Amino acid sequence: MKNKKRPFFVMIMLLSFFVSLAGPGTAAAEVKLGILPRLSPMEMATMFNPLAEYLSQEIGEKVSMVIPKDFAAFKEVVKSEQIDIAFSNPLIYIQLKKEVGVEPIALSSEFKNGTRFRGIIIARKDSGIEKLQELKGKKLIFVDKDSAAGYIFQMLLLSKSGLDVKKDFTQMPFAKKHDNVIMAVFNKTADAGGIREDDLDKMKDKVDLSQIKIVGYTDYFPNWPVFARSKLSKTTIDKIRAAMLKLTPNSSQSKAILGAAHLTGFVAVSDKDFEKLRKAAALADAL
């Protein structure tokens, strides 16, 4: 009986998330948590519902999720103050910080690299490309203009290697997904491509990765932050920050609440932690 009821429950839960996008309701005050939709709404709801429930208990106010349809919609709900706190990639955070009042609350930690992540540039082993400088005059492909580890990080890496990122190579249309970049390089549609480091191994069952090599690694950058709109009361922000920081990386409590989201916990963060990312974003005309 439980298995038959679960799909109906999930459907009702998701419906409530999307209804919340329409604007302020007439219910009692609640804190709305916006999640950047890097996966489907149902996947994101399953991943982060335990966190929303935990925060509700910790701060004494209902915390409900808002899952916009895409990255652009996510930015809009932040700008229009339809959400109070948000979780997104660091590039989206610094873009919003430049336009509206937002304050970082905590930094997420993941299983492999903790509170940081980086990108790589790949090429085929038979391409003859051995170092970054040899990408001059080549065709390069990246994920998306708002992809931190699939474009922005690589722009800083290429610039530091001595290449002019605006004219020293041909930039192909964005592939939109990391696996599409890998396929383009493998099929020789592109000479090289930029992806998040962790995403290469995910293609081992689809592509012969023995034919792919890593030409360069980007610097490490801060992971995804949780941030708040400045209109939210300082008392509530402090409560949320305290609740987040109680979820220390790899603790049993963190595993129970964040395991579905593939996170290990949260640590303290400052806006100054994103200065190097701002430099990279400026090079890619993303800030």
Image (cartoon, rainbow, N blue to C red):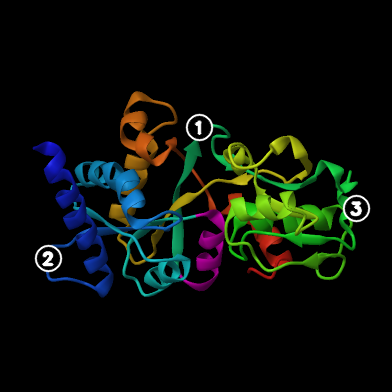
Residue that numbered label 1 is attached to: 111
Q: Which amino acid, by three-letter code, is at mark 3? A: Gln
Task: Name the quadrant containing residue 12.
Answer: bottom left
Residue that numbered label 2 is attached to: 27
Mark 2 / mark 1, whichever is N-terminal: 2
- Residue at 89% over, 63% down: 137
Task: State whether residue 45 is above or below residue 201.
Answer: below
**Quick one: quadrant of the N terminus?**
top left
Question: How many numbered discs, if any?
Answer: 3
Return the x and y of residue 286 as percentages of the image width and height. 64, 68
Q: How far apart are marks 3 and 1 (CA)?
A: 33 Å
Task: Name the quadrant containing residue 145.
Answer: bottom right
Mark 2 / mark 3, whichever is N-terminal: 2
Which dot, 2 or 3, sits closer to the camera? 3
Depth order, front residue of 99/124: 124
Q: Which mark is drawn over residue 133?
A: 3
Q: Please tell me whether mark 3 sits on a helix, a strand or a loop.
A: helix
Judge whether residue 136 is colored magenta: no
Q: How far apart are marks 2 and 1 (CA)?
A: 38 Å
Crowding near pointer 2: few (<14 within 10 Å), some, many (20+)? few
Crowding near pointer 1: few (<14 within 10 Å), some, many (20+)? few
Q: Which amino acid, by three-letter code, is at mark 1? A: Phe
Judge whether residue 93 is colored magenta: yes
Q: Distance between the residues labelled 2 and 3?
A: 59 Å
Q: Is residue 219 left or right of residue 88?
A: right
Depth order, front residue of 213/35: 213
Instruction: Say whether residue 276 is visible.
Output: no
Depth order, front residue of 235/88: 88
Q: Which region of the structure is painted magenta?
A: 89-100
- Residue at 41% over, 70% down: 73
